[in-house]
Image: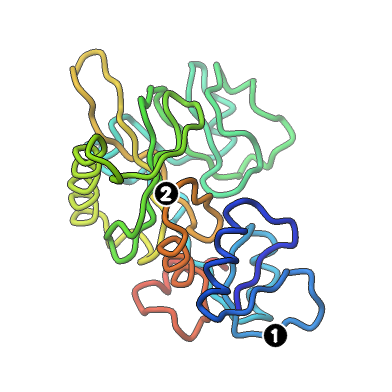
Amino acid sequence: MLVMPGQWTSTMELLAVEAAGRGMAVRAAEEPGLAGPAYWYGGPVAGARLAGRLGFALLEPTDGWLGELPEEFTGRQVRAGTIADAWAIDQPTFIKPPRDKSFPADIYSDGSRLPSNLDPATPVLLSDVVTFAAEYRLFLLDGQIATASRYAVFGRLDPRPLGTDRADWATAAQITEFTDRLAAVAGHTLPSAVVVDVGQLLDPYRPGHRWAVVEANMAWFSHAYAADPARVLDVILRAAGPREHTQPRDLAFERH
């Protein structure tokens, strides 16, 4: 059974069709009498509320994962901190919550531009300001790309499947090579089913495109964009499925 919030997005509609085609029941989280075992696609608050009753485990990257990556993969300085640290920033910085939406992820000219009513201990990621020419969403299973989609060009939403025509083959090959290197170095620091966004980083001092990690996210709360829904569902079923099916290596990434 695949459980999702009652207010569907375009990704939920695609997943529902794919799940039904596999013989899975698709249920709204608000329906009375739901019982496990179940799989989940939806937000973290509702997911955490239902996880115990429906018996699914939610896998997610750790808050500080991006900040712990070597700079060869981030292409910029990124560090984990708190809202208290962010309030003290006195120069333009990209600031985002690692997993929730407690405040908008954006470039802040200084810390005074952040909301003042947040808990000072709220975790944040603090990053140098950079420009991504294009950004791609990768749904990963066991460190391999299950499916992928471009989702933005120079910060503007522009979804497109990856590797579907000759013009995209070189880009797909570069992304695969970058992802293989990332998995070799840091694959053990991510759940076996996860979303990683990567991008072509523009650097005026280094001609040509340079690949870098944008961020990592929970597969069970990530938009599919133009990725293959069947392969997206494969990743979600691993990332938010019955707790008894959780692999030993993934126990450290279960949301509590």
Q: Residues within 10 Å of mark 1 (few under 14, many from 20)?
A: few
Amino acid type of the residue that numbered disc 1 sits on in the rendered structure: Ala
Location of residue 10 with respect to 132 vertically, above or below: below
Q: Front-most of 253 and 55?
A: 55
Location of residue 100 with respect to 253 vertically, above or below: above
* 51 relative position to 196: left or right: right
Q: Residues within 10 Å of mark 2 (few under 14, many from 20)?
A: many
Location of residue 245 with respect to 125 vertically, above or below: below
Label at residue 35: 1
Label at residue 216: 2
Q: Residue placed at 30% from the left, 66% from the top?
A: 142
Give residue 210's position: percent from left, percent from top.
Answer: 23, 29
Q: Residue placed at 52% from the left, 23% from the top?
A: 107
Give residue 11's position: percent from left, percent from top.
Answer: 57, 54
Amino acid type of the residue that numbered disc 2 sits on in the rendered structure: Ala
Q: Residue placed at 37% from the left, 26% from the top?
A: 132
